[in-house]
Image: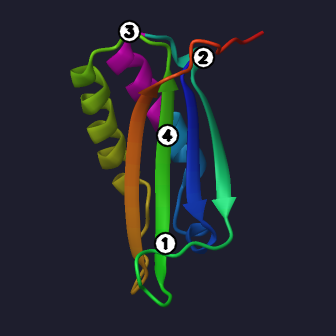
Amino acid sequence: MPQITVDYSAELDDAFDRRGFALALHPLVAETVTTEVPSCKTRFRRVEESVVGDAPAGDAIVHVSIGLLAGRTPEVKERLTESVLELLAAHLKPTGDLAVHASAETRDLDPSYRKS
């Protein structure tokens, strides 16, 4: 059930261990929200161009969005989001002068969500 999407700047291709992140993320999500690891699905979307604030160049972004079936408390969602940001930092290699703006959110899936 957890639907996880990670948008990341193309400049991070060599600095972001995406597979390692997903393989570490799934047990973290499963334990935090009481689900099973095989239910977790993560997809990565490479963003060719991004702009942060008024920076002329040199910034990168990573945003992790986790969609869950309704029913988790705001505290559980907040704990998961904080843990995801900590885990993300562990899977990003130093990027020199490139500033990386990391963010995450945990939200409820729309009631229309279905899977087959």
Name the residue type under label 2. Answer: Pro
The answer to whether residue 94 is seen in the rendering is no
88 shown above or below 23:
below
Q: Determine which residue is flagged by label 2.
A: 38
The mark closer to the camera, 1 or 3, is: 3
Callouts 2 and 4 close, C-beta under 8 Å = no
Q: Are marks 1 and 3 in contact (CB under 8 Å)?
A: no
Residue extending furthest bottom?
56
Number of residues whose C-alpha sits closer than 10 Å to that of mark 2, classed few (under 14), some (14–19) or many (20 or more): few
What x and y, as percent, mark residue 99? 39, 77
Magenta highlight range: 24-34
Q: Decide which of tag 3 and tag 2 comes sooner along the chain.
A: 2
In this view, the mark in front (2 or 4)? 4
Quadrant location, the N terminus: top right
Secondary structure of the residue carrying tag 2 is helix
Q: Which residue is mark 4?
A: 65
Q: What crowding class fits label 1: few (fewer than 14 Cα within 10 Å), some (14-19), or many (20 or more)?
A: many
Circle 4 packing at 10 Å, graded few (<14), some (14-19), many (20+), is many
Residue type at numbered disc 3: Gly
Q: Which residue is mark 3?
A: 71
Q: Which of the marked residues, 1 or 3, is nearer the chain's N terminus?
A: 1
Q: Which mark is residue 60?
A: 1
